[in-house]
Image: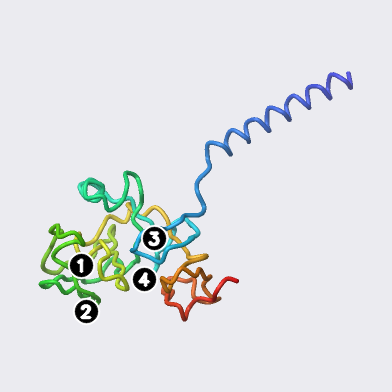
Amino acid sequence: MIRRTRTTYLAATAAAVMVIGAVSVTDITPRLIWNASASLPIGLYRVEPPTTLTLGDLVAVDPPEPLAQFVTARGYVGPGVPLLKRVAALPGTRVCRTGATITVQGEAIGEARERDRIGRPLPTWQGCQVVGTDEVFLMNREVGDSLDGRYFGPLPLASVTARIVPLWIDAAGDGRFRRPVAGTEGGSQNLSPTATEETK
């Protein structure tokens, strides 16, 4: 009886382990991402759920159609590759494009370009709009040629798939990777060389 009970227990335990293992295998999501684009410093970023977003957060975005088709057709990113952008305006914020100038709450935060690096015309929008409750405005203001809200305006909040945090980056663009110093990993983080320390 004891042997049968032990055999039953071991079988049940093995089955439970198999179930847990199956869940673990099917529920794997990447926790790190390597950015090789020019929109943000090249390097390693940690991926977190986008449970709450604050101004200045770095996020990964699955662009909706027809933007997704546009960026892949142009070769800006590969199919299924997320865009990495910074939160520049949250719901309720007034954003405008007047000519090439982008403003948020009346403050100029950057300029749009007419053409990309190889001379192809870029999308444009004009006027002002208030970011909706289910929208977010994304713009990498530190990068003049970033493809972002300058060209396609606010995006659905649902297109944000993750919040990303820099772990080991080439902030200066000199090929030397550094980790952000303590206190600069939050939403308004500065990715300039002064906000990083070199990893020996």
Residue at screen point 47% across, 54% down: 33
**Mark 4, secondary structure of its residue:** loop
Q: Quadrant of the C terminus?
A: bottom right
Residue denoted by label 4: 55
Compared to 90, does 25 lie above or below? above
Q: Residues within 10 Å of mark 2 (few under 14, many from 20)?
A: few
Q: CA distance from mark 2 to mark 1?
A: 16 Å
Residue denoted by label 1: 130
Q: Earlier in the sequence, mark 2 or mark 1?
A: 2
Tell which residue pokes out farthest to the right in this image.
2
At label 1, the amino acid type is Val
**Mark 1, secondary structure of its residue:** strand
Identify the image quadrant of residue 199: bottom right
The location of residue 140, given as percent across then percent down, is 31, 68
Compared to 29, does 125 lie above or below? below
Residue at screen point 16% across, 74% down: 101
Q: Residues within 10 Å of mark 1 (few under 14, many from 20)?
A: some
For the residues bearing labels 2 and 3, Cβ distance under 8 angstroms: no
At label 4, the amino acid type is Leu
For the residues bearing labels 2 and 1, Cβ distance under 8 angstroms: no
At label 3, the amino acid type is Val
Q: Nearest the camera: 114 or 27?
A: 114
Q: Nearest the camera: 155 or 69?
A: 69
